[in-house]
Image: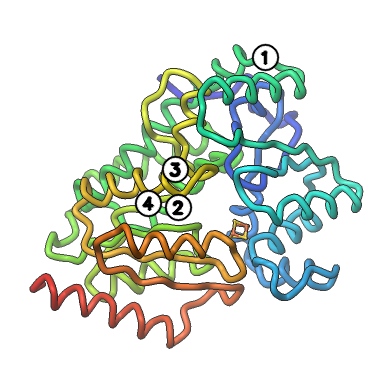
């Protein structure tokens, strides 16, 4: 099956910015082209400039860089409708939405249910579909069309942890991009197919390298972090949130798909999912990334207690590069694991 969503996804579709992973199937069914504002921000050639726009407009220095970056994208890029997730992502988004509205943009709030309950999710999706002028049935058709893209993302993930043929950064990039399939699911499918075909022919990474998990929100360091880890004889074989964004698990409905998605709900849902993957992927150590000024960082207290593996917590802000201090901490962390595992 192909994910070609040619019919609903064409040049005439209206762009809609999304502040995090949302039920894009409903948006596509309603004739929108979802664009993840986080991905646009972090792949902008000058993300600092987008943060400066927000600070110049009054966003405080101690506000999370992603929120400021998203605001900068809204001001700089030609996207006038934004879906803001007000429950199940970030409390800062509520005020961001107010400011965007004040600036004249059309904002559409979306709230994940309080609990990952399928019936509640079904009602939430139904309400959203009606609000946007479509039906859940049409959204289910889009889900089926996107299935192949999600299966490809799953295959790429498998090539990372099972076959050691795909790097941690490639894994990060393709899984995180599944939040909006780069706005072009057909292209995503074509390109990822080619990447997988190429990766299958590669020589595997040495299997004595240290296997790391990356948990937490995607970092501001991008490729540099993964490359630096690799240059020290380790590799990331599990990107937690990115895998969640890609929604690679087999499901039979949108309500199920968005209920087993752990990110919007209690940390215990995330812990169960992480624990399963740590064991399955034979992980040696965990990098927990936290964004400066983000409430999610507090969850590290619980992670340190429940995960019985060495853990390094890295905090990034808006510097977009690894400074010497962070490099030294990563080196020392990997060295410590090497000593303890005799590798
Ligand atoms: S990193 Fe944290 S504070 Fe920043 S947007 Fe994400 S959830 Fe909100």
Of the numbered discs 3 and 4, the one sitting upstream in the chain is: 4
Image quadrant in which the N terminus is located: top left
Disc 3 marks which residue? 244
Label pair 1/4, CB-CB below 8 angstroms: no
Q: Is residue 142 left or right of residue 305?
A: right
* Extreme residue toward the left, this view: 342
How far is mark 3 from mark 2, CA to CA? 13 Å
- Residue 40, percent from left and from top: 63, 54
Which tag, 1 or 4, sits closer to the chain's start?
A: 1
In the depicted structure, whether residue 133 falls above or below residue 223: above
N-terminal of the two: label 3 or label 1?
Answer: 1
Q: Are marks 3 and 2 in contact (CB under 8 Å)?
A: no
- In the rendered image, which residue does mark 1 sit on? 135
Query: In the rendered structure, are the residues bearing label 2 and label 1 in contact, judged by CB atoms less than 8 Å apart?
Result: no
Q: Residues within 10 Å of mark 3 (few under 14, many from 20)?
A: many
Asked whether disc 2 touches disc 4, contact meaning CB atoms under 8 Å apart, the reply is yes
Q: Secondary structure at mark 4?
A: helix
Query: Could you give the CA–CA distance between mark 2 and mark 1, rounded to whole angstroms?
Result: 31 Å
**Is residue 228 placed above or below 161 in the rendered structure?**
below
């Amino acid at each position: 099956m192909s994910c070609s969503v040619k019919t609903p996804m064409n040049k005439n579709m209206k762009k809609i910015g999304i502040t995090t992973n949302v039920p894009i199937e409903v948006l596509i069914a309603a004739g929108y082209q979802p664009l993840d504002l986080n991905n646009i921000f972090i792949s902008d050639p000058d993300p600092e400039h987008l943060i400066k726009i927000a600070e110049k407009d009054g966003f405080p220095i101690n506000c999370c860089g992603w929120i400021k970056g998203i605001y900068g994208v809204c001001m700089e890029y030609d996207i006038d409708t934004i879906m803001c997730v007000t429950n199940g992502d970030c409390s800062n988004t509520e005020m961001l939405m107010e400011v965007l509205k004040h600036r004249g943009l059309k904002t559409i709030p979306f709230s994940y249910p309080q609990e990952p309950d399928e019936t509640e999710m079904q009602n939430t999706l139904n309400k959203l579909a009606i609000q946007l002028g479509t039906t859940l049935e049409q959204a289910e058709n889009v889900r089926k069309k996107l299935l192949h893209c999600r299966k490809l993302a799953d295959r790429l993930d498998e090539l990372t942890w099972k076959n050691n043929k795909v790097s941690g950064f490639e894994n990060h990039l393709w899984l995180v991009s599944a939040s909006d399939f780069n706005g072009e699911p057909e292209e995503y499918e074509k390109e990822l197919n080619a990447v997988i075909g190429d990766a299958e022919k590669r020589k595997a990474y040495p299997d004595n390298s240290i296997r790391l998990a990356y948990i937490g929100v995607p970092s501001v360091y991008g490729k540099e972090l993964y490359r630096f880890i690799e240059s020290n004889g380790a590799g990331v074989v599990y990107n937690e949130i990115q895998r969640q964004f890609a929604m690679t698990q087999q499901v039979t409905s949108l309500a199920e798909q968005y209920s087993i998605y752990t990110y919007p709900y209690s940390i215990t849902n995330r812990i169960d999912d992480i624990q399963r993957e740590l064991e399955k992927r034979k992980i040696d150590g965990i990098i927990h990334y936290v964004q400066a000024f983000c409430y999610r960082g507090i969850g590290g207290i619980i992670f340190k207690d429940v995960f019985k593996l060495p853990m390094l917590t890295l905090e990034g802000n808006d510097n977009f590069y690894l400074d010497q201090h962070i490099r030294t901490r990563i080196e020392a962390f990997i060295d410590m694991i090497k000593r303890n595992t005799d590798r």
